[in-house]
């Protein structure tokens, strides 16, 4: 791979603009390449220093970059170049401006299953490219599925911070990702594989069609229990206008044994994505997603996000007070730890305590 990161100042070649997003250890800013006027997204990842817990480990940054460099597909974000300073590694990425797919859909008044399946189809094509390269994304969720721009319906998968190369030799286990979307093998700390992503595709599709989250409980424990017990149903209240084809697609993904779960190729060839008979096509044409409940789901989600910001602010001001009173003792501040609580999106990474449904 040759870790050739540019050491010269980013500002020599790019003009740095507004913040457009942030993550655990990263801030994403809009930048403009001075020579061409072309815009990009620059992801500034803070390096971990010493034994602390603030910042991303160099090893993990290298992995994210190496994975992005090995990918090249219209439905996957492109990486152009990498800069490095003593504090940060900066990834110059293709800029997406269309926002999250789910936000785009929640602004619509109507969405037929045909359109919904076309979106899922694009996600699957991006994912097939990953899986063909033996890469698992391991963090598929609505926040990481974006639209290239407002006009195009072109999907881009982003955030390869948790992505892993899957091999026969290496046994990867990790409790990570966002509770609602993770597979049973993640919850039970068993071996992860490409199939782990397929479960998340099932959850994403379920929510897209109904506005209901299949395994979400009142607490993280309950969510985990629902996942491992395969405790879900197609509630008539939410799924009355859903085709049997779509439900069949989801059922093949909510399979506990990863080896028996539908693969990305199975999904691409499923009749809901690629109808073979006329009646399949008609079934899809006459079914619609539950847009009212979907909008309600998105409203709840935004509300939860804003509650997180409020509680983070409260804790920040508490920790600043604490810091003021302990500064004289030379204690280190906890701001950086607090920053790990992600602002704009809900991630319960590393089994961080879940906030209860408001
Ligand atoms: P996480 O903590 O979820 O792993 P992260 O630190 O790895 O996040 P990303 O998810 O890659 O960071 O980026 C954070 C946010 O920045 C995204 O949710 C998205 O809103 C925005 N973003 C990321 N990449 C791009 C891009 N290429 N174009 C536009 N916005 C982007």
Image (cartoon, rainbow, N blue to C red):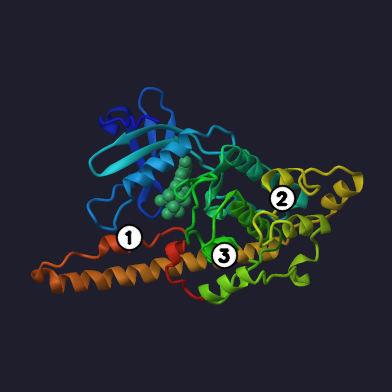
Taking 261 as reference, is 72 above or below it?
above
Which residue occupies the foreground of this view, 111 or 284? 284
| Left or right, residue 51 beside residue 268 | left
Image point 71% across, 50% down: which residue? 116
Image point 29% across, 43% down: which residue? 88
Q: Position of residue 85 (x, y in %)?
A: 25, 38
Mark 2 element type: helix
Q: Categorize mark 1 by other alpha carbons within 10 Å: few (<14), some (14-19), many (20+).
A: some
Q: Are marks 3 and 1 in contact (CB under 8 Å)?
A: no
- Whether residue 26 appears in this view of the structure is yes
| Left or right, residue 241 beside residue 332 | right
| Left or right, residue 185 beside residue 16 | right
- Which of the 4 image quarters holds residue 205? bottom right
Q: Position of residue 140 (x, y in %)?
A: 56, 52
The label nearer to you, 3 versus 2, is: 3
| Left or right, residue 312 beside residue 261 | left
Image point 46% across, 73% down: which residue? 355
Residue with the mark numbered 2: 116
- Whether residue 43 appears in this view of the structure is no
Q: Which mark is residue 339?
A: 1
Residue with the mark numbered 3: 180
- Which of the 4 image quarters holds residue 255? bottom right
């Amino acid at each position: 791979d040759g870790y050739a990161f540019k050491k010269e100042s980013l500002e020599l070649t790019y003009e740095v603009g507004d913040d457009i997003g942030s993550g655990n250890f990263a801030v994403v800013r809009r930048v403009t390449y001075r020579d061409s006027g072309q815009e990009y997204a620059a992801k500034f990842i803070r390096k971990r220093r010493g034994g602390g817990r603030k910042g991303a480990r160099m090893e993990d940054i290298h992995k994210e970059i190496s994975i992005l460099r090995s990918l090249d597909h219209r439905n996957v974000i492109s990486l152009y170049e990498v800069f490095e300073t003593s504090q940060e590694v900066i990834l110059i990425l293709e800029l997406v401006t269309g926002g999250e797919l789910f936000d785009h859909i929640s602004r619509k008044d109507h969405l037929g299953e045909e359109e919904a399946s076309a979106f899922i189809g694009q996600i699957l094509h991006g994912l097939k490219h990953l899986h063909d390269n033996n890469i698992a994304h391991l963090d598929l969720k609505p926040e990481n599925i974006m639209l290239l721009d407002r006009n195009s319906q072109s999907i881009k998968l982003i955030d390869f911070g948790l992505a892993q190369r899957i091999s026969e030799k290496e046994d990867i286990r990790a409790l990570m990702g966002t509770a609602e979307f993770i597979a049973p093998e993640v919850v039970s700390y068993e071996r992860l594989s490409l199939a782990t992503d397929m479960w998340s595709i099932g959850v994403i599709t379920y929510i897209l069609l109904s506005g209901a989250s299949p395994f979400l409980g009142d607490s993280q424990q309950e969510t985990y229990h629902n996942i491992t017990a395969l405790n879900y149903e197609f509630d008539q209240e939410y799924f009355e206008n859903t085709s049997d084809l779509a439900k069949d697609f989801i059922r093949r993904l909510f399979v506990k044994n990863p080896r028996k779960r539908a693969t990305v190729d199975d999904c691409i060839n499923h009749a809901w994505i690629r109808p073979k008979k006329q009646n399949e096509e008609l079934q899809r044409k006459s079914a619609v997603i539950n847009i009212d409940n979907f909008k309600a789901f998105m409203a709840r989600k935004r509300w939860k996000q804003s509650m997180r910001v409020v509680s983070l602010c409260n804790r920040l001001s508490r920790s600043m007070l604490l810091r003021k009173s302990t500064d004289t003792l030379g204690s280190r501040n906890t701001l950086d730890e607090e920053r790990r609580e992600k602002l704009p999106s809900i991630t319960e990474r590393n089994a961080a305590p879940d906030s209860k449904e408001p």
